[in-house]
Each structure stands twice: as C-alpha cells, then as structure tokens.
Amino acid sequence: MPLPAALLLVALAAAVSLRGAAPPPPAPTWSGEERLAVGGHRAFLIPAPRPPHRGPRPWVWYAPTLPNLPGGHENWLFTRLLAAGVSLAGIDVGESYGNAAGRAGFDRLHALLTARGYSPRPVLLGRSRGGLMLLSWAAEHPAHVAAFAGIYPVTNLASYPGLERAAPAFGLTPVALAAELPRHNPVDRLAPLAAARVPLLALHGDQDRIVPLAENSALLHARYTALGGPMELLVVPGQGHSLWPGFFEDPRVIDFLLHHALKTPIPAR
C-alpha cells in the first residue's frame, strides 16, 4: 500500500537527513585508561598525564557511564580536561535514575578514588539522564562536590523518564514514587547543595522535547536560585535533545569545569 504523499515526503526528508549527517566521532582509547570493578559495577578512570600540582588530584566525574557512554562526542571536552591535568572517571550503575542502589555505587567509586589520592571534591558532569544520577548523589554529599555542569541534564523524574517508567528502579509503584519524590527527585532535594553554595551550570536547548527545558534545567535554575544557590543557565535557541556539536564543544562549559576543578579564573568572553 503506497504511503500518503505527506508521509512520503517526511520519510524522504528523514532519509536524506540521515544520509547527509556526519558520522559520530569514535570514542578514543585514552592513554593510561583503567577499567575498574567497583562493588560489582564496571567503572573507568582516565588519569591526567601530568597533574597540575601536588596534593589530591583534580577530577571530573562523568555520568551516565553505560556501554556506549562516554562516547566520541565527549572527545573535545575530555581532551582539554586531560591536557590541563584534570582526570576523568565514571561508574556504570545501569539505568538507576538516581535510585538508592545507584547512589551506593557512586559512594564506592568516590571512596576508591579518594583512597588513591584523588580530590574528595570532584566536579560533576552530567549528560542527559546522568543529571539524575549525579545530582541525586550530590544532594546527599554536598561537601564532596566542587561543582556540577549539565548538558541538557535530566533533573526531574516526573519529566523524564516519567514516574511509570522510573518506579521499578526504585522498587515502588508510580503512585508511591509520586508520594516519595522529595526523597528521590533532584529538583526537590536542592537545599543541601544551595546551603553549601555548590555552583551549578546547565546547557539546554529550548526545543528539547525529550528532556524539556522548562521542566528540567529551567525548573532547577528557578528553585536553586530561590534557595540562594549559585547557578548559570545557558539556553541554546533552536536546539533539541541532539548530538549537535555545540552542546559538547561550548567554551563556557570547559571554562566552568576547569575553573572549579583547578580553582583558576574563568576567562572573560
């Protein structure tokens, strides 16, 4: 049965778009990268070749760590962090959505790296649902967080993945999870971070339909600043939840990460 004309045009446009899209950059094999087993979870550590100073080694904690993440789109950020002496690490706790088991896995990674001489106060870098994971852990450990940066971060379980989909990860029904959101939802758990004045930054497209700006980064910004916490929200006009290179190669994001990892001035732009 032939497609209606309107649907045929959409299909053709999609096919042309896919054929013309640049292939994703391959994820490199980083020099010195270690594969770790932490409490039954797969983790990684990429040590910077030259730490910038004596004492605890600065590091950026990336999430989500999954079989395909971090990937090639992080190359630009990772290359610059490593060159500046900032190491990188992450742990695969599965699709935890920030649940208690995932947070316990994060505890183990933090304990392992601090025992190995890494800073007890990493900078957190959350891509998409990595925001749920990192901010959920950060809310319980504000003294162990130097800063948080998010690339279209999920900050609100009710928005993504939605309570129906998230509930099994918490061992709850959707109704029970709705009642317990203040215990699990990052945007409902900001007071400890704000009291510690942990700096936050979010880069988010205003056309994001998967992780809507208004229900995630904008809501995070409104609530966090109302509590007195420092946060910068960078809105990208016309962009959605995509692999557009600008999300991964924004100088403001790398400046923020380096500033809080190394405590150096942020360049004026």
Image (cartoon, rainbow, N blue to C red):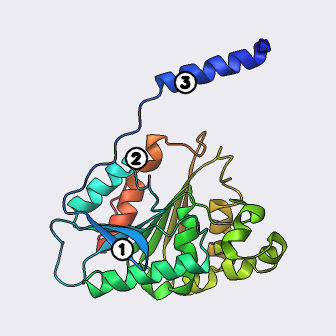
- Asked if disc 1 and disc 3 are in contact, CB closer than 8 Å, the reply is no
Element under disc 2: helix
As drawn, 111 above or below 243: below
Amino acid at the residue labelled 1: Ala
Residue 73, labelled with which disc?
A: 2
Earlier residue among tags 2 and 1: 1
**Spatial distance from mark 2 to mark 3, Cα to Cα?**
19 Å
Q: In front of the other: label 1 or label 3?
A: 1
Residue 37, labelled with which disc?
A: 1
- What's the residue at 69%, 59% (across, down)? 161
**Spatial distance from mark 2 to mark 1, Cα to Cα?**
25 Å
Image quadrant where one finds the N terminus:
top right
Earlier residue among tags 1 and 3: 3
Q: Residues within 10 Å of mark 3 (few under 14, many from 20)?
A: few
Q: Would residue 229 be seen by someone viewing this image from the given angle? A: no
Element under disc 1: strand
Element under disc 3: helix
Amino acid at the residue labelled 3: Ser
Residue 136 percent location from the top left of the image: 58, 76
Q: Is residue 197 left or right of residue 45?
A: right
Name which quarter of the figure residue 171 lies in: bottom right
Earlier residue among tags 2 and 3: 3
Identify the residue under disc 3.
17
Q: Residues within 10 Å of mark 1 (few under 14, many from 20)?
A: few
Q: Residues within 10 Å of mark 2 (few under 14, many from 20)?
A: some
In the image, 263 versus 172, the foreground residue is: 172
Q: Would residue 220 be seen by someone viewing this image from the given angle? A: yes
**Spatial distance from mark 1 to mark 3, Cα to Cα?**
40 Å
